[in-house]
Image (spheres, rainbow, N blue to C red):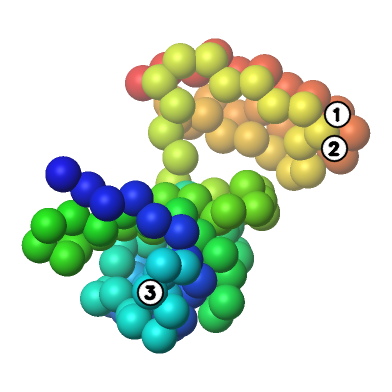
């Protein structure tokens, strides 16, 4: 059984993930001011610039009976739009306002000439 709580980030620490973002943070629970958790896993979508977590950021987290846990949301609901690493889509991917001069699908088929303000849809699969 997990105990879901609200608190503020105390520290952000390692180890780093494959993208160089720290994977753990200690949190000061709202109900126990002054007490700090053990290092909790930061959910991947909140690491680095994506979650923009800093000391004092309010978060929602779960702590399990062994005192391990996970930070899974900011209380303000913000997300800063950064996705790290390779992204694989098994199905259709649609994008608008693409800001690149070339797109390469998984099967190395290149779609080029898309500029900012344009759009592209690629349904490529492995």
Q: Which residue is mark 1?
A: 118
Mark-to-mark CA distance, 2 and 1: 5 Å
Disc 3 to disc 1, C-alpha distance: 51 Å
Q: Quadrant of the C terminus?
A: top left
Mark 2 = which residue? 115
Residue farthest front in this picture? 31
Q: Would residue 29 be seen by someone viewing this image from the given angle?
A: yes
68 up-or-down from 105: above or below: below
Q: Do the residues bearing badges 2 and 1 touch, measured as CB atoms within 8 Å?
A: yes
Q: For numbered disc 2, what is the local secondary structure?
A: loop
Image quarter (top left, top right, bottom left or bottom right) of the N terminus: top left
Q: Label 2, label 3: how many angstroms apart (C-alpha)?
A: 52 Å
* N-term-proximal mark, 2 vs 3: 3
Q: Secondary structure at mark 1?
A: strand
Which element type, helix, strand or loop, lies under badge 3?
Answer: helix
Viewer-proximal residue among 115 and 108 = 115
Residue 63 coordinates in the image, percent (x, y): 25, 58
Are there few (<14), some (14-19), or many (20+) residues within 10 Å of tag 2?
some
* In this picture, residue 99 sits left or right of residue 24: right
Q: Nearer the viewer, residue 77 or 88?
A: 77
Which residue lies under the disc numbered 3?
32
User: Which comes before the other along the chain, label 3 or label 1?
Assistant: 3
Which labelled disc corresponds to residue 69?
A: none
Q: Residue at x 29, y 67 (%)?
A: 40
The residue at the point 74 percent across, 44 percent down is 100
Name the quadrant containing residue 15: bottom left
**Front position in the image: 79 or 16:** 79
Could you tell me residue 104's position as x and y percent?
56, 34
Image vertical order of residue 85 relative to residue 39, above or below: above
Which residue occupies 10% across, 62% down?
Answer: 66
Residue for point 46% across, 68% down: 30
Return the x and y of residue 109 as percentages of the image width and height.
53, 25
């Amino acid at each position: 059984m997990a105990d879901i709580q609200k608190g503020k980030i105390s520290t952000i620490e390692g180890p780093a993930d494959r993208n160089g973002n720290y994977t753990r943070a200690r949190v000061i629970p709202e109900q126990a001011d002054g007490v700090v958790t053990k290092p909790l896993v930061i959910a991947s979508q909140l690491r680095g610039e994506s979650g923009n977590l800093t000391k004092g950021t309010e978060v929602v987290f779960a702590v399990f009976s062994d005192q391990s846990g996970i930070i899974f949301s900011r209380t303000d609901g913000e997300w800063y739009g950064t996705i790290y690493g390779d992204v694989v889509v098994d199905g259709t991917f649609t994008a608008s306002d693409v800001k690149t001069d070339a797109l390469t699908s998984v099967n190395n088929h290149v779609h080029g000439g898309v500029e900012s303000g344009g759009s592209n849809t690629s349904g490529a699969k492995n």
